[in-house]
């Protein structure tokens, strides 16, 4: 699921991202910088993840379907969904999972 940050209204200085009741136990927090030479290759695992794009643009693949993402977007990855990220320039993002 891709949640486009630029489509969420800011309320009282906050931008609420609706996770549809999902609960994710965090085992890691990683800040990544991806460039064309170091794509995050598609893979899958049992742990759900949240990816938050800090800045830049990228292409995220979820089970083989590609989505354009940009700074402010949140990617919600359920368990066993194949996922990866590539960019033609540079993207800085956070992985919580």
Image (cartoon, rainbow, N blue to C red):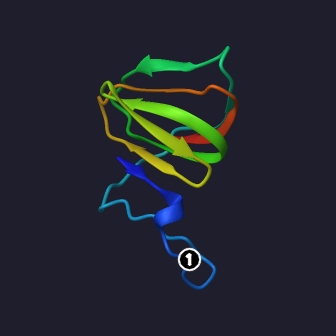
Q: Is residue 32 or residue 10 the one in the foreground?
A: 10
State which quadrant residue 10 falls in: bottom right
Q: Which residue was labeled with disc 1?
A: 10
**Helix, strand or loop for disc 1:** loop
Residue 57, horizontal then vertical, whole percent: 61, 39
Residue at 61% x, 42% y is: 94
Residue 93, horizontal then vertical, whole percent: 63, 40
Question: Would you say residue 84 is visible in this rendering?
Answer: yes
Q: Residues within 10 Å of mark 1 (few under 14, many from 20)?
A: few
State which quadrant residue 15 falls in: bottom right
Residue at 68% x, 24% y is: 35
Question: Would you say residue 29 is visible in this rendering?
Answer: no
Residue at 52% x, 60% y is: 5
Image position of 49 (left or right of 36)? left
Residue at 47% x, 56% y is: 4
Q: Residue furthest top?
A: 37
For residue 35, above or below residue 24: above
Residue 72, horizontal then vertical, whole percent: 59, 55
For residue 9, above or below residue 73: below
Total numbered labels placed on residues in the image = 1
Residue 30, horizontal then vertical, whole percent: 64, 37
Q: Residue furthest bottom?
A: 12
Image position of 24 (left or right of 79)? right
State which quadrant residue 38 falls in: top right
């Amino acid at each position: 699921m891709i949640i486009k940050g630029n489509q969420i209204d800011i309320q009282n200085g906050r931008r609420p991202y609706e996770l549809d009741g999902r609960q994710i136990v965090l085992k890691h927090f990683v800040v990544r910088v991806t460039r064309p030479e170091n794509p995050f290759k598609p893979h899958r695992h049992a742990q759900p993840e949240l990816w938050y794009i800090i800045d830049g643009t990228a292409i995220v693949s979820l089970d083989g379907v590609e989505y354009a993402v940009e700074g402010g977007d949140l990617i919600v990855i359920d368990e066993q969904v194949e996922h990866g990220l590539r960019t033609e320039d540079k993207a800085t993002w956070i992985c919580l999972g």
